[in-house]
Amino acid sequence: MCRSWHFRFVHTRTSPHCAGEGVANSGVDLIYASCHCHAPACISCELWNADSGELICEQIPIYGKFGHLNETNKYDEAGYVAIPPCLFGPESEGLYPAPYLQYNTNLTAIKKNNNTYDHYGEMAMWQMRAAQAYTPAE
């Protein structure tokens, strides 16, 4: 279901953000994307724009290496994983430009796991944040 910028549910057939004449130039700028992935089975997650074939986000986990933490390796403990999210925004802040997604954009999620490790309830769920955006009408 389409959601408005004010985080209230709107009707997908009547909202100007989701339907009607304005839908062709209405969508969102993606700001944050992160796949739900568990250690130690997580290998990678990918989010694709299925309409354009563009890779939007790829997440590769970083597994900890050290058994004893100290001031120089606070976040590098063996047995733990960090899965950095994809962040988008101003290039001046070292970020990739925000991908523009129309409300009718088709997305494909690919998650790869190592099934050597038992883990029940695996999923390829994405958590995302975006801002309302418009493109010029063609």
Image (spheres, helix red, strand yellow):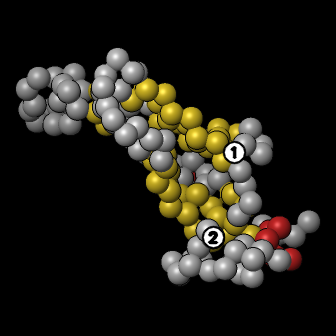
Badge 1: residue crowd in 10 Å (few <14, some 14–19, many ≥20):
some
Which residue occupies 62% across, 61% down? 29
Of the residues shown, which amino acid type is indicated by label 1?
A: Asn
Which residue occupies 65% across, 53% down? 99
**Residue 49: which numbered mark, if any?**
1
In the rendered image, the vertical position of residue 19 relative to residue 58, given as above or below: below
- The CA distance from mark 2 to mark 1 is 18 Å
Q: Earlier in the sequence, mark 2 or mark 1?
A: 2
Which secondary structure, mark 2?
loop
Which quadrant of the rendered structure holds the N terminus? bottom right
Q: Is residue 89 visible?
A: no
In-front residue for pair 118/103: 118
Which quadrant of the rendered structure holds the C terminus? bottom right
Quadrant of the rendered structure where residue 115 is? top left
Q: Name the residue carrying label 2.
A: 2
Give the tally of numbered discs: 2
Q: Is residue 10 left or right of 64 when viewed as pictured?
A: right
In-front residue for pair 123/86: 123
Quadrant of the rendered structure where residue 2 is? bottom right
Quadrant of the rendered structure where residue 117 is? top left
In the rendered image, the vertical position of residue 32 relative to residue 83, given as above or below: below
Of the residues shown, which amino acid type is indicated by label 2?
A: Cys
- Residue found at the very far front of the displayed protein: 120
- Residue found at the very far top of the displayed protein: 116
Q: Is residue 13 left or right of 40 when viewed as pictured?
A: right
**Residue 92: which numbered mark, if any?**
none
Which residue occupies 48% across, 47% down? 125
Percent position of residue 135, x then y? 78, 67
